[in-house]
Amino acid sequence: LLATAPSQRAWALVGVLLSFSWWYVAGSLNFTLGLGLLCAALAIWWRRRDGATSRSLVLLGLAGAALLAVHLFAALMFLVVIWVDLGLRLIARREVRLARPATRLLTAGAATAGVAVVWVWMEVATAGQPVRPPDFEWRLPLSQLKNLASPFLVFSVPQLVVVSGGYLLAVIGLLAHRRKRGWLEPFTVSAAVFLVLYVVSPRTWNIDLRWLPPAYLLPFCGPSTRPRPHWRLISVLFAFCVAHALTVAGYARLIRRELQEFDVALAQLPAGSRVLPLVSDHRRFRVRPYYHYALWHTIRTSGQVGGLFSRDGTREDDGTYTHLSHFKLRHVPYFPVYDWGTTLFQPLDCRKVERDYDYVLQAGRDSEARALIVRCAAPAFEAGEITVYRVPESSGRTAR
């Protein structure tokens, strides 16, 4: 905003309102950082898009390369905005000097070259490694429509109402402030492109949902020389930001209390013991605070815990994840599918549980999940919502 519309910098409150995204709370820091760095890269590009000096071209190439090194989507969003801007300039070429489109073509090419160099380097570095491509799936139209609210939903419907209400107020204020002027600019048009990309992208690993935050944020960054928004509008929007922060703080206290119970259970496990963590909390929140928390047992005592991300995946049948090649397990322990205990209740493979684990930890009190666990292990102790089961000894266990 300081680069594109200094008088409109109060719209940064929209970014504050949406900052408690579920990507951040769920730990997707590479995507969250990539989104923030995207804004910085766009500010660098905006001030240099008509100045094709050698220094500017190198800087834009480095910006594109750096974004790809953080997250693929950050680099793709960067290129979308830059090429949309070039396209708009070419469409309006009768009204501007012919040198300007050529200059912007050079800057767009420099950013694209920076991304391409890192992309080629990554492909060469991983050539020949056995990688199983993902099974792409697409959402049904109703699911796509519902998930338009994805960036607003972190914990529950009350939290969704607060943040979506604040965002709707901001949109109404932006529409009234611009008054049908200045919409054919790269940020708003890019937002429309992001929505199209959301519709056509696969849902695998929530790839499609990652187009939505920039689609909702970038229209507020559009260039403008109009006066600042009215102070009453900004005051009310600030109040929504405070209300959302307080709402998130309430859920954070609840989660902290539940994780303290988890810590009590982990503290009673023998050091170095092997633990299978299973979550059956009925998906009370969109984020899953329980899901990876048992890995603190690995950090604190070097005990093996199922579900650790590694080069060979989190399950025995996973493909190779080359971006995790820095960490390779000698033996990938048995671990059920992600939705086990919430929407899927398949019987556990007790033979593999006995082979790989000393304890099973159940977070949540779902009775159906408990009935499946007791087929493989016997209850040992409880700590609030956490139940720990002892796995019977088996001569077929893997040596530690």
Image (cartoon, helix red, strand yellow):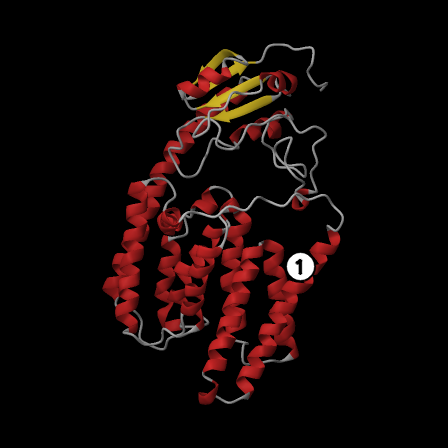
Instruction: Choose between 339 and 78: the one closer to the eye.
Output: 339
Q: Secondary structure at mark 1?
A: helix
State whether residue 1 appears in this view. no
Which residue is at the front of the view, 135 or 218? 135
Total tally of numbered discs in the picture:
1
Would you call the spot at circle 1 few (<14 residues within 10 Å), some (14-19), or many (20 or more)? some
Question: Up-down: is 164 above or below 100?
Answer: above
Q: Give the residue furthest to the right.
A: 128
Residue at (72%, 58%) from the top-left corner? 121
Give me the residue at 32% from left, 47% from top. 244
Q: Which residue is mark 1?
A: 119
What's under tag 1, amino acid-wise?
Trp
The x and y percentages for residue 101 are 54, 82
Give the image location of residue 130, x and y in percent.
Answer: 72, 43
| Percent position of residue 33, x then y | 53, 53
Q: Quadrant of the C terminus?
A: top right
Asked whether residue 88 is in view, the answer is yes
